[in-house]
Structure formats: C-alpha cells, structure tokens
Amino acid sequence: QVQLVESGGGVVRPGRSLRLSCAASEFTFNNFAMHWVRQAPGKGLEWVAVVSTDGSKTYHADSVKGRFTISRDNSKNTLYLQMNSLRVEDTAVYYCASLGHWGQGTLVIVSS
Amino acid sequence: DIQMTQSPSSLSASVGDRVTITCQASHDVRKFLNWFQQKPGKAPKLLIYDASNVDTGVPSRFSGSGSGTYFTFTINSLQPEDIGTYYCLQYENLPTFGPGTKVAIK
C-alpha cells in the first residue's frame, strides 16, 4: 500500500519560514516526479511546485516563486518544501503527490 | 499558463441519475488530463487518468472522454457515496486544476 506522509505543518507568523517533508513508502519514489499541491480553507486545489525524478529540475507556481523551494532526497524517499517569507494567504493544507498517489496533507496556518 | 474551466460549479442529482461534468482547457492539452474526487477533509483521489483511463479499483460507473481542449467526466448511475467535489487537472504543461464541481444528492 503506497504511503505518502507529510509533516512539518503548524502555525507560523507572517514572514517566517517552515519546512514541510513528505516520506514515501511502498512506492518507487525515484521513478516519479513529485508535486506539492495546496488547498486553502474552503477553496479548490492549487498546484504549488514539481521536482523531476532526479531532482535536477524544479518548477514553482508564480504565487510562490522566489519564496518556496521544492527538493527531494531519493536516498531517503523524502520530498521537501522549504517555505520562506510566509504570507497569510499561504494558509492551506499542503499535499504531496505523484498526482496518482496523494498524502493526507499537513496544515499550515500563517497568522499574526 | 493553461487555464481550466469546469461546469457546472455544482449540481444536485438523484441516485441512479447520469451525471456529466465538463472541463475546458485554454490551450491544447492533448490527453494529459486527470479527474479527481475529493470528499470533505480528505485528500483527492485519482479516478481517471490520460482523459479516459479508469484508475485501478475505481468503479466502472465512472468514465472520461475527450482530448485537446474539451473533456467530459460521467458518473453513469450516481450513488450516495459519490457525493463530493470533482476536479479536472491538466498536466500537458505545468499542472493546473479546474475550479471543481460539487456533487450532491437530491
């Protein structure tokens, strides 16, 4: 059974940083490009970032470009999202996904 | 960026009804389109990939069709457990989701 387990969410002040992790198991992690997708409370799904299978290529949504960085460590079967300069509008549940498989999400609340 | 539109934004249908949702892309996405179901408080679940392929374990009442810029998603006989929000996603380019269609039982 494929498992993607996110961690690292929490409550943070605007302007601060947070790092999300996503641990994969029962999953050929290094065969898949991996994504972060977020969902603000009561809103739809928003794609955030993708990293290629070997980590050499990354792309970020305009809304987070320059503030968030996606990365992966294939030796640890783990995906990361470094989030800097957080804004109130970054408040959301953050999911890691291969798009076929999804984690359960981790909640990030940015509030003063 | 490729923009996705979905219609309707919500619908209410009776058990056993046939339900159809459409998704339009602002540019040609060929067949790189998925459909997801999301229930409240849960992660999205993949139902259809590459526009028309039903994912493993997904009931056969779910189907998808289309290519290019116009896609349809159909539930052939709506069941109570099908309530939730349905999203299309294009991945021909950087991924973009449609705004979602909320499905309720009448």
Image (cartoon, rainbow, N blue to C red):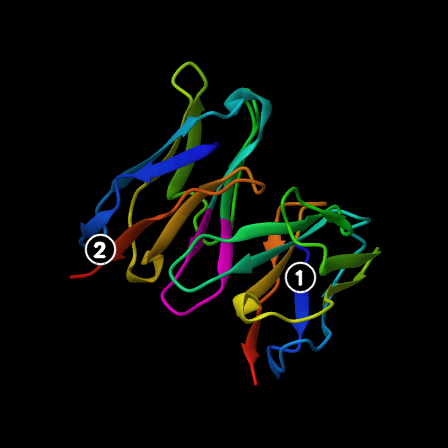
Give the letter of the chain under mark 2.
A
Whether residue B60 is in magenta: the answer is no
The Cα atoms of the two marked residues, 1 and 2, are separated by 29 Å
Residue stretch rendered in magenta on the structure: A37-47
Q: Is residue A19 found left or right of A70 in the rendered image?
A: left
At 23% across and 51% down in the image, what residue appears? A15
* Vertical comparison of A73 with B1: above or below: above
Residue B90 appears at what percent x and percent y?
A: 68, 52
* Vertical comparison of B100 with A101: above or below: below
Residue B80 appears at what percent x and percent y?
A: 54, 71
Give the letter of the chain under mark 1.
B
User: Mark 1: which amino acid?
Assistant: Gln
Whether residue A42 is in magenta: the answer is yes
Q: Residues within 10 Å of mark 1 (few under 14, many from 20)?
A: some
At 53% across and 66% down in the image, what residue appears? B81
At 67% across and 46% down in the image, what residue appears? B91
Q: Which residue is labeled 2 in the image?
A: A14
Quarter placement of the C terminus of chain A: bottom left
Q: Residues within 10 Å of mark 2 (few under 14, many from 20)?
A: some
At 47% across and 62% down in the image, what residue appears? B39
The foreground one among B25 and A14 is: B25
User: Mark 2: which amino acid?
Assistant: Pro
Callout 2 secondary element: loop
The foreground one among A20 and B72 is: B72
* Vertical comparison of A29 with B38: above or below: above
Q: Quadrant of residue A8?
A: top left
Residue A51 appears at what percent x and percent y?
A: 53, 32
Q: Which residue is labeled 1 in the image?
A: B3
